[in-house]
Image (tube, rainbow, N blue to C red):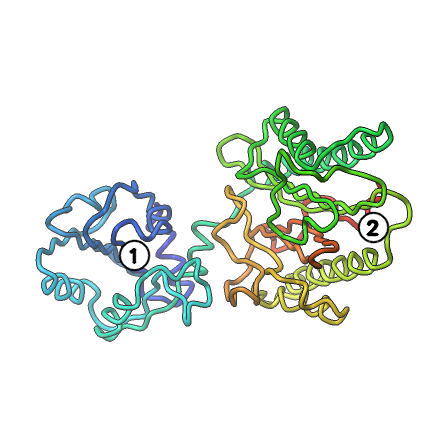
Amino acid sequence: MDIKRIQEELKRSNLDGWLFYDFHNRDHLAYRILKLENKHTTRRWFYFIPSKGEPKKLVSAVESTKLDSLPGKKIVYLAWTEQHRLLKQALGSPKKIAMQYSSKNNIPYVSIVDAGTIELIKSFGHKIISSADLISIFEALIDAQGYQLHKEAQREIDLIRKDAFSKIREAVNSEQKLTEWELQQYIMQRFKECNLTTSAEPIVGINDNPADPHFEPKQDGEYYFREGDTVLIDLWAKKNVPGGIYYDITWVGYIGHNPPQKYVDIFSAVKDARDAAIKFVKESFEKGKKCYGWQVDDVCRNVVKKAGYGKYFIHRTGHSIGEETHGNGPNIDNLETKDERLLMPGCMFSIEPGIYIKGEMAVRAEINMFINHDGIAEVTGEIQSELVLI
């Protein structure tokens, strides 16, 4: 943990301090940001980093060594009344304080502190500000090494994706009954060969199966690839090394030469929506404008709505990407949540609009974007511009 850097970011954000609080290991973000060992916690603790001056830590007499690894003055309480009094003293005069909180729970990923604790801090006269953008800075931004590891994964996964589509054609030509699950396992084997690891097995879906966005092929599934099938492949993995960053993509195709017009139409709508979102992000950074996750979702979703498929786009436009498939930075979302977090240099995220028509077909077109440290937005891998005709 770099106290000096945290204090610099607090000053830059016009905040007087950042108050961390935990009870029963509820705030996983606090442990990650503070580099604090996440041992069993049965009593409340507080850690206050002011924008200038020495941090203060308030701990229970029962677990008085809980924050000993952190710098700052230690204050020990016993009774809850003493805890309130000492916490008020530690925070001092009214301030603008960041906490793991989000107004109206707009960003539930960072809205961790309970309402009662927020009420307590406000009763001392302080104004609570969401720590959401601070969390992005200290938990979600990717450095040059992370970017290079992401690109290594990207090159290998894009090749595996091409080979997976080729394997379908080989199976159809040879009249082999290749199933969704078997192709999924082929991809997993290729991951292993390339020293890639993943949080979950890829999605391989035929026809109406991927109309469930989180469809999982089963070993005993009856679907196998045949002429006239629509196909969706969603695969994500990272290099199996410390600091590996995920690459997460979805491509779609048709087995044959003349896909149904409806399938062509929904692919076109999804592709145009994805491209509109990419353009919006790029132009925002080129013009030096602030860009938020909810704004990008609106731009993308509006294209799908205008094409007449709005009710079939049933999830957010994208998610943060990091050492986990779904990272702790801004999501591209104004549907499931209103993600008011700022996209900033170092952010990586997916853009993945989809149209899901139950009982018929589905299309999703997913790419990854990175805001590099010069403030230039880029797509990090290949972009699907046409249906793959398998």
Q: Viewer-nearest of labels 1 and 2?
A: 2
Q: Tell me whether circle 1 and circle 2 mark residues in contact (CB < 8 Å).
A: no
Residue at which label 2 appears: 386
Q: Amino acid at mark 1?
A: Phe
Between discs 1 and 2, the one toward the N terminus: 1
Q: Nearer the viewer, residue 143 or 355?
A: 355
Q: Which element type, helix, strand or loop, lies under badge 2?
A: loop
Residue 330 lies left or right of residue 202; in this view the side is left
Q: How many marks?
A: 2
User: Image quadrant for the C terminus?
Assistant: top right
In which quadrant of the rendered view does residue 68 lie? top left
Numbered label attached to residue 20: 1
Q: Position of residue 191 (x, y in %)?
A: 62, 30
Q: Amino acid at mark 2?
A: Glu
Q: Position of residue 178 (x, y in %)?
A: 75, 32
Q: Nearer the viewer, residue 112 or 122?
A: 112
Q: Nearer the viewer, residue 75 or 314?
A: 314
Task: Name the residue rendered at 63%, 69% in the picture.
Answer: 298
